[in-house]
Image (tube, helix red, strand yellow):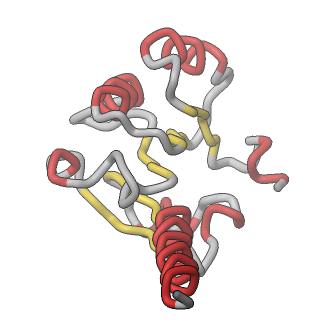
């Protein structure tokens, strides 16, 4: 009789551990170590499991369910894809975490935010300007 509640607590603890692991997983898509070094401090948390992945290998990555990352980071624009492509892909893959597009400088990120919101309204998205002007640098 006592095995039941103990086992359930153990199962819950294992599930919480998986959830905690998921919350610490970050996919860094097409990012160089130099760009990662310029991230706001709270995005470089040493407890986070940052996984470097190319855009081409993203199709093989887990993007939904309990093993999905909590956060996806990518450049705003590359020769292969841009934030609109990435937002569309993440939305179609049923990604429920947060997506941040990184850029060196940008006069106004509002246009991009509106475009992504129109394309993928359920996606939690923002732009991080790496020159330190982004509100995320203040956190």
Q: Quadrant of residue 32?
A: bottom left
Q: Is residue 95 left or right of residue 24?
A: left
Q: Looking at this view, name the residue that lies furthest to the front.
A: 1
Vertical placement of residue 98 versus 20, above or below: above
- 87 or 30: nearer the viewer: 87
Q: Quadrant of residue 44?
A: bottom right
Vertical placement of residue 109 versus 71, above or below: above
Q: Is residue 21 left or right of residue 77?
A: right
Q: Quadrant of the C terminus?
A: bottom right
Q: Is residue 52 something one can see in this rendering?
A: yes
- 2 or 128: nearer the viewer: 2
Give the image location of residue 76, x and y in percent: 45, 35
Vertical placement of residue 26 versus 113, above or below: below
Give the image location of residue 70, x and y in percent: 50, 54
| Residue shown at the point (50%, 9%) measured from the top left | 118
Give the image location of residue 107, x and y in percent: 67, 23
| Residue shown at the point (17%, 45%) measured from the top left | 59
Q: Looking at this view, name the residue that lies furthest to the top.
A: 118
Give the image location of residue 73, x and y in percent: 46, 49
Q: Quadrant of residue 89?
A: top left
């Amino acid at each position: 009789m006592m095995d039941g509640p103990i086992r359930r607590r153990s199962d819950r603890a294992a599930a919480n551990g998986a959830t905690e692991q998921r919350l610490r997983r970050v996919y860094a898509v097409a990012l160089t170590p130099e760009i990662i070094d310029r991230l706001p401090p709270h995005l470089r948390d040493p407890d986070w499991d940052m996984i470097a992945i190319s855009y081409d290998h993203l199709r093989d990555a887990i993007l939904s369910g309990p093993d999905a990352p909590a956060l996806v980071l990518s450049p705003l624009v590359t020769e292969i894809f841009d934030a609109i492509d990435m937002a569309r892909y993440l939305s179609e893959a049923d990604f429920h975490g947060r997506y941040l597009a990184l850029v060196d400088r940008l006069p106004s990120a509002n246009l991009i935010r509106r475009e992504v919101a129109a394309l993928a309204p359920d996606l939690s998205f923002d732009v991080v300007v790496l020159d330190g002007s982004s509100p995320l640098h203040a956190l």
